[in-house]
Structures are given as structure tokens and as C-alpha cells.
Amino acid sequence: MKISPLLASATILSILAIQPTIAQTGQPAETPRNPQVDYAGFLQLTEQLSEYRTGRLIDLDRFNIVAKQPNAVILDTRSAAAFAQGHIDGAINIPFSDFTEEKLTKILGDKSRPILIYCNNNFRDNVPPIVLKRAPLALNIPTFINLYGYGYENIYELDGVTHIADPRANWTGEPSPFTLDAQSLRSPATLDATRAN
């Protein structure tokens, strides 16, 4: 195979250009990393929180009990538009994309207060404003991690799945096209069918 003189020259020049970098560091030059983005730190925090988060998952009945504690807040981190279409009654909205130290401090204040979180994936209706996300991308996960990372450690996450028509969910807003009455939600046949989904 014959190599063109142009390709051979370009290859030699490329090797010569990176030689000083390799000679100085022993490694090829890396693209500078953004000091304001720490993926390794995020992974470390996520790993540290795994067991703690598991202990902070609570069912809907316990969620409602904790929500009645003094100073407790139900935090909905979906978009403002989704929140306006419907949410758990009494919840406040801070869209996840708006999380900053300043905003969380201004709105949530006391870092020891009970904070209850939920997301689309706690509801099986899969209609606007609670369209399901892929399970590993459910909003509860980054919300929990970020709140903890900002120093809010008294976090409770709604565990399990329900319907917005379940009266225990205290859903406000326009109901989905699908409706169930409270009696059918509590019937064993409906509960078994929803657990299977």
C-alpha cells in the first residue's frame, strides 16, 4: 500500500505537535474540563445517598401524615406549566431547572423542615400533566439528590404508584380523561390490576 506524501506529512506534523505535551505530562493533552460541572462528585453523592434515600421512601398514607407536620412542605419540581394543570393540593412549585442555592433558601428556608417530593412516575394515569418518564429518569431521583446536595436532609419521597382520582392523592386540577370512582380504586380487583401494571 502506497501512502500519499501529503498524508505522511500531515501524520508527522501531528505527532510532532503533541510531542511536547506528552513529554511534559506523560499523557496526551486533554480538553480542559469545566470546573463548574463535577460529574464524579455527582456520582459520589448519588452513591452515598443510595441507602439513605431508600429509608426515606414513604407510602401515600404516611406521606399525608408527614405533610401535616408543622413546617412541612410538599415540593413539586415539575415545570410551572405542568404544575398549573394539576398537582397535589398544598404543594408549592420550584421547577427542578430553577434550583439554585439562593432560590431554595428563599423559598424553602429552614433546611431541617420536612420536604415531601413526588413526580409524574408516582401516578399511573400517564396523561398530561403527569406523563410518565423512563423509570431511571424519574424526576424524584435528581430532585432528592439535589436537595440533599444543597443541605436539605429531611426529605421524604413518595413511594409507590397511585391514580390522580385516588382521594388520598389530594389531586387538584383538571382530571384526566380517565376517571375511577373512589370505591373502585379500593376494590381488591382494581388494586390487583394496578399492582400488575
Image (cartoon, grey):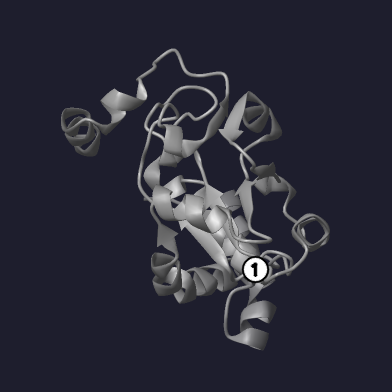
- From this view, report whether residue 74 is shown above or below residue 102: above
The secondary element bearing badge 1 is classed as loop
Q: x, y percentage for residue 50?
A: 42, 70
Quarter placement of the C terminus: top left
Please report the residue visible at 58 percent of the width from the left and 34 percent of the height from the top: 87
- From this view, report whether residue 99 is shown above or below residue 150: above
Observer-nearest of 175 and 25? 175
- From this view, report whether residue 81 is shown above or below residue 60: above
Q: x, y percentage for residue 84?
A: 67, 27
**Residue 143 appears in the rendering:** no
- From this view, report whether residue 171 is shown above or below residue 17: above
Q: With 15 as the anchor, is 133 left or right in this view?
A: left
Q: Quadrant of residue 76?
A: top right
Please report the residue visible at 66 percent of the width from the left and 36 percent of the height from the top: 79
Q: Quadrant of residue 187?
A: top left
**Residue 43 appears in the rendering:** yes
Observer-nearest of 128 and 189? 189
Q: Residues within 10 Å of mark 1 (few under 14, many from 20)?
A: many
Q: x, y percentage for residue 128?
A: 52, 22
Q: x, y percentage for residue 155?
A: 56, 63
Query: Dot 1 corresponds to which residue?
Result: 152
Please report the residue visible at 25 percent of the width from the left and 33 percent of the height from the top: 194
**Amino acid type, label 1:** Tyr
Please report the residue visible at 30 percent of the width from the left and 25 percent of the height from the top: 183
Count of labels in the image: 1
Q: Quadrant of residue 40?
A: bottom right
